[in-house]
Structure formats: structure tokens, C-alpha cells
Amino acid sequence: TRQEVIGKNTADINGWANPEDRVRVRTLLAKDGIIENFETKFRAKDGSITSVLTSAKVVSLNKTPHILSVSKDISAIKKTEEELTELKDNLERLVETRTIELQNVLNEQKVILDSIGLGVMFLYNRKIAWSNKELARMLGYGDAMIPVGTSTRLYYKNEQDFREFGESGGNFDQSSGL
């Protein structure tokens, strides 16, 4: 109750969950005369802990210094931050798991594509993103893979054909001759 705390300091009522925070606040107030948005935890009468944001200032009343403080309960904010962190961690685990699953599928597909006896490649922005061993062999790379990022320019008889096909947006139609 109000009567239980009037005339007592926070140490008397065991109000600080972390007594070192009380020492730090008193040190900062002695040095600067003010603190703003100091995050700490208070202990309630029933022993429960509440996260708070505290601002305080040394003021003089009848030529006697006092500490005027304001504290805001930020427990809901802290709980939301913890939940967001947990969600982020869960999402990162899911992405990692899914990435491994996709990598396994991709590896299986590569094994299949390497064994079919046909040259196969995947393109991105007119550059080779992946090719199988057969295509590499067909193009004279031997057992080495075609380097990722190799331009598809080598598949056109001249620069003009390469440029025109790119300008057309890569559309395949009867007039393109492809």
C-alpha cells in the first residue's frame, strides 16, 4: 500500500530486482543529476518482477535534494521482443532446414541430369547458372564443369544475333529462327 512505501527508499522495500542497478542509477544521478530511459527491473511486493523504463532527476525541495523519478512498465514490450526473437529464431531454423531439403533435391536432380547422356544447362540473365557434365564434355570442357556465369554468347554465330535475341526479350517465335 501507499503507506507501506512512504518515507522509505527502494532499498528498504527491496524494490530493485537487481540491486546493482540501484547503485548505478544513484551514481549516474550523483554525477549528472539526471537519467533518462534507464531500463531495469523492479520487484513487486508479491515478489513478481516487472521490466521498467525509468527516468529520474535530482530536485531540491526546501533546499534538500530529492530524487524525482518516473517509471513506465515495459513488460508487454519486452514480452513482444522475446516473442519476436523466438519467431525469428524459429524462422531461421525453418529456412535452414528447407535450404538443406532443397539442396538435397537439387543434388538428386543433378545426379539424374548428369546420367541421362544429354547436355543440359540452366540459364539466368543469359549466363550459365548450371550445366551437367555431358554439356561440359560436348563443349570441350572435359570433366571440368562450365564455370558459373559464363555468357551464352558462345552459342550465337555472331554478336549481332546475340544482341538481337537479348533485345527481343528472348522470345522464341518462328521469325527468330531459333
Image (cartoon, rainbow, N blue to C red):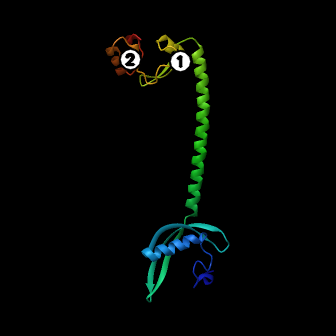
Tell me the distance, in whole angstroms, between the alpha carbons under discs 2 and 1.
18 Å
Residue drawn at the location 59% of the way across and 47% of the way down: 89
Q: Which mark is residue 5?
A: none
Residue bearing mark 2: 153
Residue 118 in percent (x, y) is at: 54, 12
Amino acid, disc 2 = Arg
Residue 157 in percent (x, y) is at: 36, 11
Disc 1 element: loop
Front in this rendered view, residue 34 or 26: 26
Label 2 Cα neighbours within 10 Å, binned few <14 / some 14-19 / many ≥20: some
**Up/down of 176 relative to 47, above or below:** above
Residue bearing mark 1: 132
Residue 165, quarter of picture = top left
Label 1 Cα neighbours within 10 Å, binned few <14 / some 14-19 / many ≥20: many
Q: Is residue 155 visible?
A: yes
Amino acid, disc 1 = Asn
Residue drawn at the location 52% of the way across and 71% of the way down: 24
Residue 94, quarter of picture = top right
Is residue 127 left or right of 94 when viewed as pictured? left
